[in-house]
């Protein structure tokens, strides 16, 4: 087949994927619109619309995430929102770009479905350029913006030095959206030609929906709230909406640098939110919703059969490990990514020696490190290191999706949690593991907001400081006290000395000279002490140590 014929095949395929050019009903868009949009959709759509209003002539927006996380659905929802041919729930966002674009201004290219991955590495970009040229010259109107959506950019198999060809796609009045499986594949800043782009946004990770978004999204959790509860929570998170914004105040007060809100104000606002703004019924519902979230993991599903959902979730994750992630990192034994993920499931945040991981999968420490780096890039498994050490012989491994904890562990461990709905089976130990995993994931998200380096841990004589957020000596320690592991959290908190911290300069063994300070120590708990309820305060003073209790659901809510 000649190159011209191959190019024509890709153009013909593009016509089938863009039925809206011919006023055809798109089943893909209809299916996507039938699903409740997640907050990522509104964030991307709103930012894009604002950039357009601010005069950005061209733009790139990159997102990445695991297989099956919802990247394609998100792109279809963005397309549906742009067009005026599909009814779309606007969620009262008042976004100016909505229903403002002609169908012929939109091109969607699913690279994997269109078999671009069959092209020789680095040559898949050529037929893509032909398709885009056809769109610009034969489909799109000469005036007005063009919106190009390229799904699964990883299918192009292009090297870093050839990736700048993607920027050649972006001329005046072109908005380009890319998806991939890791950030590096969709990173466009710094490439040749990047200076010609008005706005380069991302890469932005698409993660399992966090708790605060799950309670705002209809159909995710089984707990029912009042009809306007989602809107109330939205206003609590943002100063741009009517009413108080206590969640934003708390998050700003926890920032480790450059915040106009103090940590004292954050603690006061935690009290106000818990005891003043939210009544006891709402607090009870949020408590139940947090337990429900451990099972649902913030995912929207087409199928409500638990067996089918589990098989799909496991298939997606294994496909991601064996096909996408191993190909990206040139892993010769992808089963080892699977094995480390299973080790993470069985240990669920318990400390493990690197030598044990090496022995278990039969590779050296350096190879283990390379596997863990790849799994971290894929936001599949993340490490936590000891705050008090500069060299690590041990680590704690956390799966970033709590459902994977169920799917990769033995049934004797996770019994009662196969289903997504609450069961009349008591398995407190596994619920603790799930809750601990979810808390770590949300601590990672909070760390990003408060500008912490990472989420670390350390031991005191009495017990564990599970999550430590730190930047330039400012420390936020969190003790995780959840049934059945609730021993002496206050003693652990008061024993913690932030000056045990050891952090080296970048690419150096030389220690940073920080004056470590932890003005408050936080205790995450599934059951508040009676004294806190009686005193109507989460704050406790123990000598010169300031403690603040955080109900588990409240920690998830503010993260």
Image (tube, grey):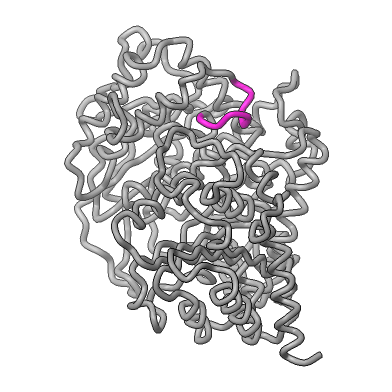
Q: Position of residue 476 (x, y in %)?
A: 32, 42
Nearest to the observer: residue 480 or residue 237: 237
User: Looking at this rendering, what residue extends furthest in the bottom direction?
Assistant: 2
> Which span is picked out in magenta?
216-223
Taking the image as shown, residue 177 lies to the left or right of residue 248, namely: right
Give coordinates of residue 178: x percent, y percent: 54, 65
Q: Quadrant of residue 170?
A: bottom left
Q: Main secondary structure of the magenta part?
A: loop
Q: Is residue 222 magenta?
A: yes
Query: At 75% from the left edge and 84% from the top edge, which residue is drawn?
Result: 6
Q: Nearer the viewer, residue 411 or 166?
A: 166
118 w.r.t. 313: above or below? below
Quadrant in the picture for the C terminus: top left
Q: Residue at x 58, y 29 (%)?
A: 218
From this viewpoint, is residue 350 visible? Answer: no
Quarter in which the N terminus is drawn: bottom right
Asked if the stretch drawn in magenta spans residue 176, the answer is no
- Taking the spot 66% from the left edge, 73% from the top edge, the residue there is 155
Q: Residue 3, position in %: x, y?
A: 72, 90
Task: Work out whether 515 lies above or below 264.
Answer: below
């Amino acid at each position: 087949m000649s190159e011209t014929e191959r190019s024509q095949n890709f153009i013909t395929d593009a016509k089938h994927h863009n039925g809206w050019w011919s006023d055809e009903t798109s089943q893909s868009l209809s299916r996507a619109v039938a699903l409740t949009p997640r907050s990522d959709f509104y964030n991307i759509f709103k930012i894009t619309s604002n950039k357009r209003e601010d005069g950005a002539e061209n733009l790139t927006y990159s997102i990445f995430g695991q297989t099956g996380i919802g990247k394609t659905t998100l792109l279809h929802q963005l397309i549906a929102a742009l067009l005026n041919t599909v009814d779309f729930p606007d969620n009262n966002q008042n976004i100016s770009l909505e229903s403002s674009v002609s169908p012929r201004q939109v091109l969607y290219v699913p690279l994997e479905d269109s078999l671009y991955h069959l092209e020789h590495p680095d040559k898949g970009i050529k037929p893509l350029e032909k398709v885009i040229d056809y769109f610009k010259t034969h489909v799109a109107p000469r005036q007005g913006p063009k919106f190009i959506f390229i799904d699964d950019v990883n299918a192009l198999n292009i090297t870093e030095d050839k990736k700048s060809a993607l920027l050649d796609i972006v001329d005046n009045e072109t908005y380009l959206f890319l998806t991939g499986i890791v950030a590096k594949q969709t990173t466009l800043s710094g490439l040749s030609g990047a200076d010609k782009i008005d706005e380069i946004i991302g890469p932005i990770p698409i993660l399992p929906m966090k708790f605060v978004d799950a309670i705002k999204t209809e159909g995710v959790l089984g707990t029912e709230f009042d009809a306007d509860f989602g809107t109330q929570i939205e206003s609590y998170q943002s100063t741009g909406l009517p009413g108080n914004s206590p969640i934003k105040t708390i998050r700003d007060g926890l920032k480790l640098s450059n915040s106009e809100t103090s940590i004292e104000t954050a603690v006061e606002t935690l009290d106000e939110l818990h005891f003043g703004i939210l009544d006891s019924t709402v607090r009870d519902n949020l408590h139940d919703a947090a337990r429900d979230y451990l099972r649902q993991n913030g995912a929207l599903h087409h199928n409500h059969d638990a067996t089918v959902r589990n098989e799909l979730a496991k298939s997606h994750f294994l496909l991601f490990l064996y096909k996408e992630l191993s190909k990206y990192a040139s892993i010769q034994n992808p089963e080892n990514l699977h094995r480390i993920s299973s080790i993470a499931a069985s240990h669920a945040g318990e400390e493990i020696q690197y030598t044990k991981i090496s022995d278990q999968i039969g590779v050296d420490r350096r190879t283990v490190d390379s596997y863990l780096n790849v799994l971290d890039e894929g936001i599949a498994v993340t490490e936590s290191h000891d705050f008090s050490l500069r060299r690590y012989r041990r680590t704690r491994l956390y799966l970033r999706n709590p459902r994977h904890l169920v799917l990769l562990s033995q049934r004797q461990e996770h019994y009662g949690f196969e289903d997504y709905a609450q069961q009349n089976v008591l398995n407190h130990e596994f619920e603790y593991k799930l809750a601990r995993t979810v808390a770590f994931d949300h601590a990672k998200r909070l760390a990003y907001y408060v500008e912490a380096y990472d989420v670390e841990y350390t031991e005191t004589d009495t017990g564990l400081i599970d999550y430590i957020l730190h930047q330039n000596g400012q420390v936020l320690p969190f003790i995780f006290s959840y049934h059945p592991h609730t021993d002496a959290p206050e003693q652990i908190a008061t024993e913690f000395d932030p000056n045990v911290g050891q952090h080296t300069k970048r690419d150096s063994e030389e220690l940073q000279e920080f004056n470590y300070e932890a003005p408050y120590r936080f205790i995450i708990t599934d059951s508040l002490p009676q004294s806190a309820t009686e005193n109507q305060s989460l704050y406790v003073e123990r000598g010169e140590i300031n403690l603040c209790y955080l109900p588990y659901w409240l920690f998830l809510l503010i993260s």
